[in-house]
Image (spheres, rainbow, N blue to C red):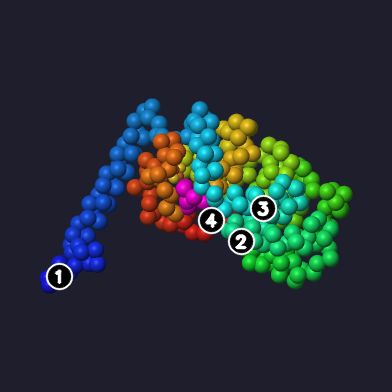
Amino acid sequence: MACGLVRTHHGNTERENEARGSRKSEIGDLRAIGNSLLRAVPGYHPAAVKPKDIPAVHRILDRERSRRHAPVARLAEARDEEPFRVLVTTMLSARTRDETTIVVAERLFNVVRKPADFRSLSLKKIEKLIFPIGFYHTKARHLRRLPLVLDKLFRGRIPDTMEGLCELPGVGRKVASLVLTDAFDKPAICVDAHVHRISNRAGLVKTSNPFETEMALRKTLPQRYWKTWNFLLVSFGQTVCTPLRPHCKSCPIRRFCDRRLNRESVVGSEGERNEGRRQPR
Ligand code: SF4
């Protein structure tokens, strides 16, 4: 058979496949050019979640959450709202899949019920209890130090302020924010990889790191949505707006979304491939 006429397993010739691939990339290029021309028109604003859309988007995301049963929902159920459990579970969940965190937290809370219980456990024992959590050596060290720091600075109690929580070993703004909202019902916005990614993709904020996203969301998002924003976006990020290949065609908020317009120009780019690597929370 002549070169280029070999049939592939789809029944097409290589030449037909090549032609189809080049047509697709031409269409992608034309769309990208069209979008950049549109953006250059004075007064033109691409689709994006605007402040007035937030109540509608929040409602849709809440409905999706109840339909889709994302791993984060099971984690929230397993954890309840007791400050110690929220703190420890959130520390464990960083850079770990929620499915793993659920199993490990259950095992750990069978042995440890309050901060002081970590005193009686050796480092090796804590490591064994929390394996295979990501960075389990470091997290075991943090958990072992937790009762010492709590006793020294907070009379053994879990603090209920951002500043206080950030004094604890291994606790940064992300963990502290979730403890504030979920354990103490205080206003905070926990920005993890999902919240940062989706808030930017949808055009609600334009930021380059989670801290900037948190500050931008604090200005844009009405405070009544702060507590639930993390939970809804993590759930949405685990099921629809996934890191590598978001399900834009069936996305319930696509009419609000900025990224949808540029999709052809970014899919397959280096940045997108990097974004798709394992996404820690
Ligand atoms: S799935 Fe697609 S359309 Fe929906 S929010 Fe994510 S990027 Fe936008």
How far apart in space, not on screen, are marks 1 and 4 (Cα)? 43 Å
Secondary structure at numbered mark 4: loop
Residue at the spot x=68%, y=37% of the render? 187
Secondary structure at numbered mark 1: loop
Asked where in the image residue 31 lies, by quadrant, the reply is top left
Asked if the residue at label 3 sits under 8 Å from ligand 1, the reply is no
How far apart in space, not on screen, are marks 1 and 3 (Cα)? 60 Å
How far apart in space, not on screen, are marks 4 and 3 (Cα)? 22 Å
Residue 37 percent across, percent down from the top left: 31, 36
Residue depth check, mark 4 versus mark 2: number of the one nearer the observer: 2
Q: In which quarter of the image is the N terminus?
A: bottom left
How far apart in space, not on screen, are marks 4 and 2 (Cα)? 14 Å
Q: In the image, 70: left or right of 114?
A: left
In this figure, which residue is indicated by the disc labeled 3? 78
Residue 211 or residue 241, whichever sits in front: 241
In this figure, which residue is indicated by the disc labeled 1? 3
Residue 198 percent across, percent down from the top left: 50, 44
What kind of residue is marked 2?
Thr
Q: Which residue extends farthest front? A: 67
Residue depth check, mark 2 versus mark 1: number of the one nearer the observer: 2
In this figure, which residue is indicated by the disc labeled 2? 100
- On residue 279, the disc is 4
Q: Which of marks 1 and 4 is nearer the N terminus?
A: 1
Q: Which residue extends farthest left? A: 2
Q: Earlier in the sequence, mark 4 or mark 2?
A: 2
Q: What range of the chain is rendered magenta?
A: 238-243
